[in-house]
Image: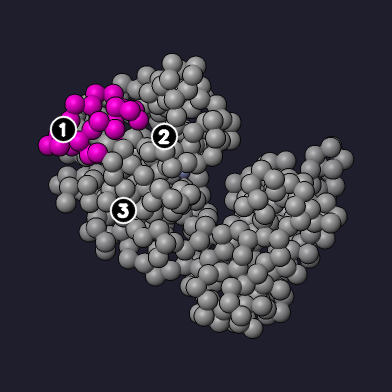
Amino acid sequence: MQKTLLIILDGLGDRPIGAFNGKTPLEAASTPNMDKLAAGGACGVMNAMPKNLYPTSEEAHLAVLGYDFVKDYPGRGVLEALGIGLKLKSDELAFRVDFGTVDKDLKLIDARAGVIESVKELCKTIGDVEIDGIKFKIYPSLLYRGVLILSGNSVKNYLKRSKSAVSDTDPHKAGPHKLGVRVLHPKAFGDSKEGKTVARALERYQYLTYEILNEHKINKKRVKKGKLPANFILTRGGGHIKNIESFKDKFGLKSACIAGAPLYKGIGAYLGMKVINVRGATGKLDTNVKAKIKAVQKSLKKNDFVFLHIKGTDMAAEDFGDPKMKKEFIERIDKEFSPLLKLKNVVISVTGDHATPCELKDHSNDVVPVLISREKSKDDVIKFGESECSKGSLGHIYGKDFMKILLGN
Ligand code: ZN
């Protein structure tokens, strides 16, 4: 039986760069392996989501994987929680949290506490907390990130009645101007008594943990060394798990997910994919691509569909705005792709979830190139890149149609 490998290079799409003679980082990169896949198959360009919406990675992934990014989206907190291996019940409320730094007026100094290396000890000290009958459990994730889970009767009753969770307290929507803004008050949606109880308890939890964190020896040490203390738990992406059709039920395919960053593992887990943990898969620019490709080869033996996620392309553009770094990262991964060209009876697709132009250091609605290594719909594209792929036989497609095209029905 024919198997499928979907490779999503996060934030792959970009814009012409002057220093690259008007080529994008992908076009400027030497990518013999992806070029061979493109030359042997069909190409096109894609917007994962409708062009009038900002493409977040999580919603764009759901769309590309054949899900309704509105109806099926459980909130970022849920995906992060699943991504670090937590099991969630439908009556629990999950937030993605960032340990940030605030001043005494709770105005934001840094949303990442100077990119603190770990919040494991801080989470341990905070431990489990109960306020107004609501239980709070906090778990560390990568660097300054964590997950906060709320449970109890008020949470349960609130989630039963309300479609949404509780609003973000991280003022991230204020964009680059968020520094100096006071952290936001959590607000429940709707007018229910339970909602108000949940929001009030969450705010009390934040004040309580602010006191604990300020007095913590790790933070005292950081301040002494001139570093920023991780003294405030900023919440965002609140949500609860939804009962969705599994990938297996939807497509009849046994599937696996190979990713480094927790969010993408969480997406795989949410869809019921087998999440493979790969040593050295960091979800960053230093990720061990070779180990991930080995895991792909192994997983294809046991599964019909493998989803491989690589984050570095997005990081080079969003965190560093560096086209050269993006180009070199693309070249590094392309080199590791050579074993994939020898796979028999595997259709390979390479694409992105959205564009992340280096000049914007942000996601955009520019198209991403798509290749599907299936011979029967072959076109004349011989180089994998934005302009070349726009002349391919797949044309301009949207995420909602992608899986149908990929699976050939
Ligand atoms: Zn992304």
Residue of label 1: 378
Magenta region, residue range? 370-395
Would you say residue 376 sits in the magenta stretch? Answer: yes
Residue 170 placement, left or right of 81: right
Please, is residue 256 above or below residue 227 in the view? below
> For the residue carrying disc 1, how many other residues have a C-alpha within 10 Å: few (<14), some (14-19), or many (20+)?
some
SS at badge 1: loop
Tag shown at residue 400: 3
Residue of label 2: 13
- Quadrant position of residue 183: bottom right
Disc 1 marks which amino acid? Lys
Q: Residue visible at 47% across and 63% down?
A: 74
SS at badge 3: helix
Q: Residue visible at 31% across and 48% down?
A: 398
Residue 167 placement, left or right of 358: right
Q: What is the spatial separation of the Cα atoms under label 2 and label 1, in whole angstroms? A: 22 Å
> For the residue carrying disc 3, how many other residues have a C-alpha within 10 Å: few (<14), some (14-19), or many (20+)?
many
Residue contact between numbered discs 2 and 1, judged by CB atoms under 8 Å: no
Would you say residue 387 sits in the magenta stretch? Answer: yes
